[in-house]
Image (cartoon, grey):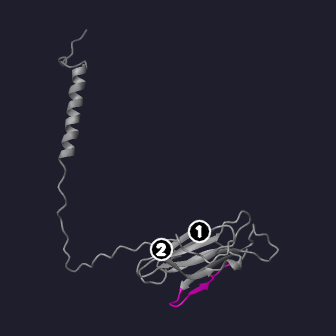
Amino acid sequence: MQQSAVPELAHTRARPIHWVATATAVAGVIALSSVVQPGSATAAQSTAGTPAAPAPAAPPPSTAGVRFPLACGPVEAVVASTASGDLDGDGRPETVAVVHCDAAMGTPPDGVYVLTRGTDGGTARLVATLVDPKDRLTATGVTVRARAVSATLLGYSSADVPNCCPDVRTPAKWQWNGTAFVRSTPAGAHSV
């Protein structure tokens, strides 16, 4: 048998005292790291010539507590979806709400409404109707981008088409012109 060139190590077998010593050392490191914390940052940027940070944006109006002009009879009005953004350029966001009656069958028509918050920051109020439920349309894919509301409106080619199955699809876009929301249909729009 050949002898090893390296002398035998004194601690080749772990004993319980070694595990206790290791656990104590690790606990000491953890305790020390929780006491010693880095100092707070002290670097400051020069304010000369830099624009002030914009004020935090106001939250969009909530649909809670808003009475929508829907005649739902014994069922409740349901907010199906919302989209928010600054539609009139005043720096405060508006909320576009898609609302319909909670019908048990068929596809209930939607109303699409614009809500704003008063200058006092109070309860949201309804300021415009983009789609009237009387038009028997369903609004899908409602978005707010570049101060405009876009949606796809699903409707019916005749009164004979069942409420479950809209057969006409029309893209629509509304933009605030300073006094009212003006609807346009994007170029190349086709009905199905």
Residue at x 20%, y 71% (from the top left corner):
45
**Left or right position of 45 against 65:** left
Q: Which segment is the magenta one?
A: 176-189
Q: Is residue 17 above or below residue 191?
A: above
Mainly helix, strand or loop, the magenta region? loop
Determine whether 164 is above or below 67 in the image.
above
- Residue 111 x/y as whole percent: 63, 76
Dot 1: what SS? Answer: strand
Kind of residue indicated by mark 2? Pro
Q: Which residue is mark 1?
A: 79
Q: Residues within 10 Å of mark 1 (few under 14, many from 20)?
A: some
| Residue 135, disc | none
- Indicate the secondary structure of the residue bearing disc 2: loop
Alpha-carbon span between mark 2 and mark 1: 14 Å
Query: Circle 2 is placed at which residue position?
Result: 61
Magenta-colored stretch includes residue 184: yes
Which is more N-terminal, label 1 or label 2?
2
